[in-house]
């Protein structure tokens, strides 16, 4: 079984712990408890309900799945090159954490919460203003491709380095989704690392969540059995990225 073995969480420069994320239950506190939380270990599925394996993922395509809650979208991206390793990141309040890197055969596969840490823009079934820009393309948000862009306010994030902020008004990285790959090559999600914005998102988008999930309780339901992965242009009717 391939697993991202160990990572470290620091608090304003002080090392707190170095531990396998799969041994953690509940919150692992940095200095305020927000930087890591384990959730249900959930198998990722393709559009037909089959276990998701790396060979069906196309490079530089933005895929979406909902995790850890029924209404919280995440990006899954197979990069064109291996992700970096052991990247030190910092949230808006200055707490540091270490992003371990990509997973899969060549460490190219990464996943992030698709809720922009700036003002919570996110994909929904109608539209998305967030997405990955392939390396050979450019956007208004950043001078180079190979980045995740929020077209709402032109923030850009580097998916190779834990979604570190490259440009725009965002003050902290996108939260990363902890993935592992089992003996059969199937992807699983099990935790969130970094400044997740789930509760601000639930509070700010109640009308939208009621529209798409009928009620807030269903929107906040934890994903438990499996999470279906779809291309962004299938998940959202309209994708607006510039």
Image (tube, helix red, strand yellow):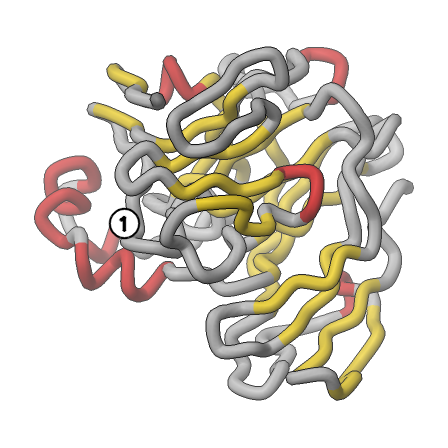
Give the residue number, with chain letter if any, for mark 1: 219
Work out whether 65 lies above or below 17.
Answer: above
The spot of residue 128 in percent (x, y) is 30, 28
Work out whether 219 lies above or below 125.
Answer: below
Residue in front for this viewpoint, 113 or 37: 113
Is 124 situated left or right of 172 in this image?
Answer: left
The spot of residue 222 in percent (x, y) is 42, 54
Q: Residue at x 61, y 64 (%)?
A: 38
Q: Which quadrant is home to the N terminus?
A: top right
The image quadrant that residue 10 belongs to is: bottom right
The spot of residue 125 in percent (x, y) is 25, 26
Work out whether 80 lies above or below 114.
Answer: above
Q: Residue at x 59, y 77 (%)?
A: 95
Furthest-front residue in view?
143
Residue in front for this viewpoint, 39 or 232: 232
Is 19 situated left or right of 225 in this image?
Answer: right
Q: Residue at x 50, y 64 (%)?
A: 195
Is 210 situated left or right of 155 in this image?
Answer: left
Work out whether 37 lies above or below 202.
Answer: below
Q: How many marks?
A: 1
């Amino acid at each position: 079984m391939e697993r991202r073995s160990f990572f470290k969480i620091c608090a304003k420069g002080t090392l707190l712990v170095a531990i396998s994320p799969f041994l953690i239950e509940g919150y692992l506190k940095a200095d305020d408890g927000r930087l890591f939380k384990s959730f249900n270990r959930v198998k990722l599925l393709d559009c037909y309900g089959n276990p998701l394996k790396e060979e069906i993922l196309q490079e530089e395509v933005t895929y979406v799945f909902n995790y850890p809650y029924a209404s919280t979208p995440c990006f899954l991206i197979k990069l064109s090159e291996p992700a970096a390793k052991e990247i030190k990141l910092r949230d808006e309040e200055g707490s540091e954490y270490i992003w371990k890197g990509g997973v899969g055969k060549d460490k190219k596969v990464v996943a992030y919460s698709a809720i922009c840490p700036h003002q919570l823009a996110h994909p929904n079934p109608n539209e998305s203003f967030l997405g990955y820009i392939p390396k050979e393309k450019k956007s208004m948000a950043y001078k180079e491709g190979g980045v995740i862009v929020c077209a709402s306010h032109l923030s850009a994030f580097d998916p190779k380095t834990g979604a570190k902020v490259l440009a725009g008004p965002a003050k902290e990285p996108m939260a990363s989704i902890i993935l592992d790959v089992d003996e059969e090559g199937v992807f699983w999600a099990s935790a969130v690392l970094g400044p997740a914005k789930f509760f601000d998102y639930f509070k700010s988008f109640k009308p939208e969540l009621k529209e798409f999930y009928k009620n807030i309780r269903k929107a906040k339901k934890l994903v438990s059995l499996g999470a279906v992965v779809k291309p962004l242009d299938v998940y959202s009717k309209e994708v607006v990225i510039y």
